[in-house]
Amino acid sequence: MAEADCNEACSRARPTVGNRRSAPSAGSERQTDVSVMDTRLAAASDEAELFEIHRAVFRGHIEQFWGWDEEWQRANFAAEMASSTTLAVRIDARLAGYLQFREEDDRLFVQNLALLPDCQNRGIGTELIRMLQAKAANRGIPLELAVFRTNASALRLYERPGFEKRCATDGHTAMFWRPT
């Protein structure tokens, strides 16, 4: 893939104006390897706490590429909340992360998946990705995302359920999964 095409694929991770759509299994409860996970559509009242999770999970990666601008990050996070379906993820009744995605005509796009560090590597992220894969498969469309190249654990998370690397920029690796 040409670098310009890859830059476009990775730039599609930025917020776009659009409507929120139905959430996969919002309000559902699932058993992971050691915890009970439930999801619900995030409310405006969740935004401050979800931003704290965003900061905890992504700040180190963002600082490596662009530096951390608190004001810009807060505004961008608010834009992502407005343009994406955002699921609040609770583990054992505690807010522990969020999943943001956009439904487009030709694909589902994972905007962000963030879990607090003590909730990572427990099968929770995998379960969330499987929910989106089922939604994409039902529509017969691919599931796509862009992940920080510095986030090796996230790259492994997406490779396990069959995502393939599409291309890379200096900051991101674009990945996709297609239903069979």
Image: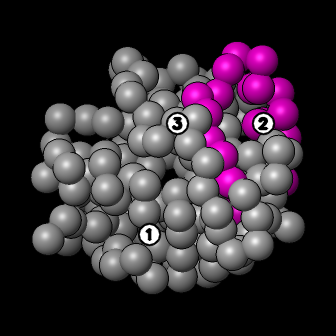
Q: Which residue is mark 1?
A: 173
Query: Which labelled disc corresponds to residue 51?
Result: 2
Residue 107 horizontal/vertical position (percent): 23, 46
Q: Where does the C terminus fall, quadrant-wise?
A: bottom left
Describe the element under mark 1 as helix, strand or loop. Answer: strand
In magenta segment, residue 111: no
Secondary structure of the magenta portion, mostly?
helix
- Are there few (<14), some (14-19), or many (20+) residues within 10 Å of tag 1? many
Disc 3/disc 2 C-alpha distance (Å): 20 Å
Residue 171 seen by the camera: no
* Contact check, label 1 and label 3, Cβ < 8 Å: no
In magenta segment, residue 39: yes
Residue 97 horizontal/vertical position (percent): 72, 48
Disc 1/disc 3 C-alpha distance (Å): 28 Å
Tell me which amino acid carries mark 2: Phe
Could you tell me how many numbered marks the image carries?
3
Q: Which residue is mark 3?
A: 26
